[in-house]
Image (cartoon, rainbow, N blue to C red):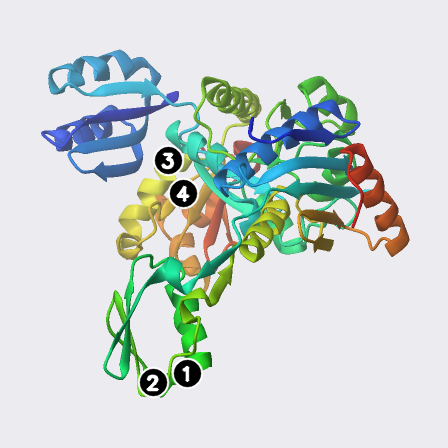
Amino acid sequence: MTMMDQFEVECFEEIGRDFYRQITETVLLDHNLTSVVTKLRIFIDPRLPIFVAVGTIRDAGGSIRVSDIGSVQTQGDSTIISIRDETHLAKFLTRLYEIFGHEHIDQPDRFTVVISGIEIPKGFEQLEVVNRADTVFRDLIYAMTVIAPEGFKVRRESYGRDQFFYVASENTLPEHVVEDIVVGQFAQIGEELR
Amino acid sequence: MILIPITYKGGVYRHDEVVDYIEDLGGYIVQKHDIAQEIVLQALIPKDDVERFRDFIRPLAGEVTESPLVGTEIAVVIPSLEIHHLPHSACDIAEYLRTVGAKTNMIGLARGFGKRISQLNDEERDVINEHDLAIYVLGNFETCIEQKFNVLRRGIRVPIILTGAPPVDALKRITDPPAAGYVGNLGRFMHRTRTDADIGRLDAVIEEVSHVLSGIRDELAQDPLSISPARLMEVIKEGVPDIDSVYSPTPLTVQLTGLRVKLPFTRYADQIRSLVVEEGILVGDIAEIRPSRMRDYILVQIKPFSETHIVV
């Protein structure tokens, strides 16, 4: 947890607070998020009851492009892509089907994709396949769902360019109340809700 | 004859002699596990013969330990078994109790989560009441436990051991009427129990369970059962051969005051009722046979001596 610049858990019950600090550390570590989150503040009030998590993240690494997935070679009227990294292959194939259509795409073996009978647009190698920031935020919100107490089914979550917040309760809370709490929590870590 | 619950661990070689010896002593085997080359027997043997049994198994390099929870069925109750919150600390509690011989069932409540919204339905209540004891594994906040514990214990007649993150003193303070036992510092956490501190907390659960169960056994001794549950298990095993074709690890689960028979009630209840225990005494005379709320199992509740005036 030393990788985070700031990490706080606030709750008026000391023992509960310490347990939730431990839970947060375990969950972020399990989801490989400790190197991504820079600031995290969790506020829990079991009397209301409410669970609020606000934080900021580092640059998650940006886009994964075709050139990151494999090398592109043209042979006659076919383009052969030799896959180096399979991690995003499923998403990559989906993108290819969208752009070129199923009839022009073939995968003869696990590490080879062939595009045939269609012209490849210029700058194809720089085409964005996945934006890593989307996945990181999704993972982060999932991790917050795991950390939050059981039964807090009424949730509100949001993420922007480098900020996120997650609010959960078992009661429906008016929007302005949630907003005030979130703004207040961001202020505690020296940030402004954008 | 006072029977002591024990666990025997030893090799496969000549283990049939160990089984015969336990039966010759007048003991009962409650459960038998074959784990590769190892045999684990959970049994009840006469108190006076424990040393004799130790001498018998010495040449076989077996090991005997006293397991106070053998012959008990314990419910580990948890507000929810939600996938987001795995692993649940209750999983480790249930597993650890099994190592000392208890048969544990995890009961994840359908609507047990939350503070204001937590509920216990009639099926859950009845299933919990079919056990010898219930362990309520609640969370980390005193405020929540104080409010929801009374809701989750409504209608529960079996002794309850309450666990939660607040210390024992705090748990005692917030529960009214008091529970049968308390284990503090054991709330919701998201890791498997591996450290010494974690194992220490699980040991505290075992200690509390043993303490509460010995209290129940003392009470039972005041008005003994008409038949020992282990002996009744043998009677059913011999009289209903179909029990051998049940795939469950414990087709006959021994409890403190009865048995759970994992056969359909409608087809087998009358057959069990009419089994002969001894000349002129049928199972139906000394025990109540009723349907269990757990699947379509049969629950056998042994009547006390004061009710039947029979002890076999």
Say which residue label 3 marks.
B230
Residue mark closest to the camera, 1 vs 3: 1
Residue B185 visible in rendering: yes
Asked whether A106 or B288 is in front, the reply is: A106
**Disc 1 residue type (three-letter):** Phe
Residue mark closest to the camera, 4 vs 1: 1
Say which residue label 4 marks.
B253
Chain for mark 2? A
> Is label 3 on the same chain as label 4?
yes
Chain for mark 4? B
SS assignment at label 4 = strand
* Residue B32 image point, x, y percent: 27, 37
Distance from the alpha carbon under mark 3 to that under mark 4: 9 Å
- Are the residues flagged by discs 1 and 2 in contact, CB closer than 8 Å? yes
* Residue B262 image point, x, y percent: 40, 53
Q: Residues within 10 Å of mark 1 (few under 14, many from 20)?
A: some
Residue mark closest to the camera, 2 vs 3: 2
Q: Residues within 10 Å of mark 4 (few under 14, many from 20)?
A: many
Query: Residue A100 — which label?
Result: 1
* Residue A45 image point, x, y percent: 80, 36
Mark 3 / mark 4, whichever is N-terminal: 3
> Is label 1 on the same chain as label 3?
no
